[in-house]
């Protein structure tokens, strides 16, 4: 399938991959975390591509940037939750590295994307 619009953006594709990884990793979290850490990690990870998509559909650069900055804030929030999940023993070192590496990749792409709009 050939993608168009926001679906062809590397920043979108990588951030979507991050959401899928977060869902995979949080499936093993304790059930008592379902409405806390599991939910928070999933929500902020989803916020990244969702805000990229919403910003992509906006007309002015300032409108676009507003949503891309929100995406970056959600990505920063996720960084803390990944650290916390490791400290609580909910994820392995391998999962941690995979999550952080992908989060860092998305961050670099998002920062570059923001600079290209400015």
Image (cartoon, rainbow, N blue to C red):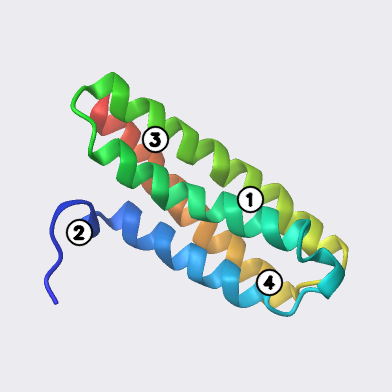
**Which residue in the structure is indicated by mark 3?**
68
Residue 8, which numbered label?
2
Q: Nearer the viewer, residue 107 or 44?
A: 44
As measured in the structure, the alpha-carbon distance from the residue carrying label 1 to the one carrying label 3 is: 15 Å
Real-space CA distance between mark 1 and mark 2, rounded to the nearest whole angstrom: 24 Å
Mark closer to the chain start, 3 or 4 = 4
Q: Residues within 10 Å of mark 3 (few under 14, many from 20)?
A: many
Is 92 drawn above or below residue 12 in the view shown?
A: below
| Contact (Cβ within 8 Å) of mark 2 with mark 3 | no
Determine the residue positioned at 68% across, 71% down. 26
In front: label 4 or label 1:
4
Q: Are marks 3 and 4 in contact (CB under 8 Å)?
A: no
In contact (CB < 8 Å): disc 1 and disc 3: no
Where residue 7 sits in the image (x, y, percent)?
Answer: 23, 59
Residue marked by disc 4: 26
Please, is residue 54 above or below residue 33 in the view? above
- Give neighbour class at mark 4: few <14, some 14-19, many 20+ (Cα, 10 Å): some
Going from the N terminus, do you reach mark 1 or mark 3 first? 3
Q: How much space separates mark 4 and mark 1, taking CA atoms?
A: 13 Å
Question: Which of label 2 and label 4 is nearer to you?
Answer: 4
Q: Earlier in the sequence, mark 4 or mark 1?
A: 4
According to the picture, the residue beneath numbered tag 1 turns out to be: 78
| Rendered residue at 58%/71% (across/down) | 23
Residue 4 position by quadrant = bottom left
Left or right for 94, reference 54:
right
What is the C-alpha distance between the residues marked 3 and 4?
25 Å
Q: CA distance from mark 2 to mark 3?
A: 16 Å
> Foreground residue, 82 or 31?
31
Residue appearing at x 40%, y 38% in the figure: 111
As drawn, 23 above or below 84: below
Mark 4 secondary-structure assignment: helix
């Amino acid at each position: 399938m050939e993608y168009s619009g926001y679906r062809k953006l590397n920043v979108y594709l990588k951030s979507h991959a991050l959401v899928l990884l977060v869902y995979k990793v949080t499936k093993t979290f304790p059930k008592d975390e379902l409405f806390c850490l599991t939910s928070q990690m999933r929500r902020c990870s989803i916020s990244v591509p969702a805000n990229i998509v919403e910003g992509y559909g906006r007309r002015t650069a300032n409108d676009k940037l507003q949503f891309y900055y929100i995406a970056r804030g959600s990505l920063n929030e996720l960084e803390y939750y990944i650290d916390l999940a490791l400290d609580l023993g909910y994820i392995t070192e391998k999962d941690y590295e995979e999550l952080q590496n992908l989060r860092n990749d998305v961050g670099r792409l998002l920062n570059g994307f923001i600079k290209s709009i400015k």
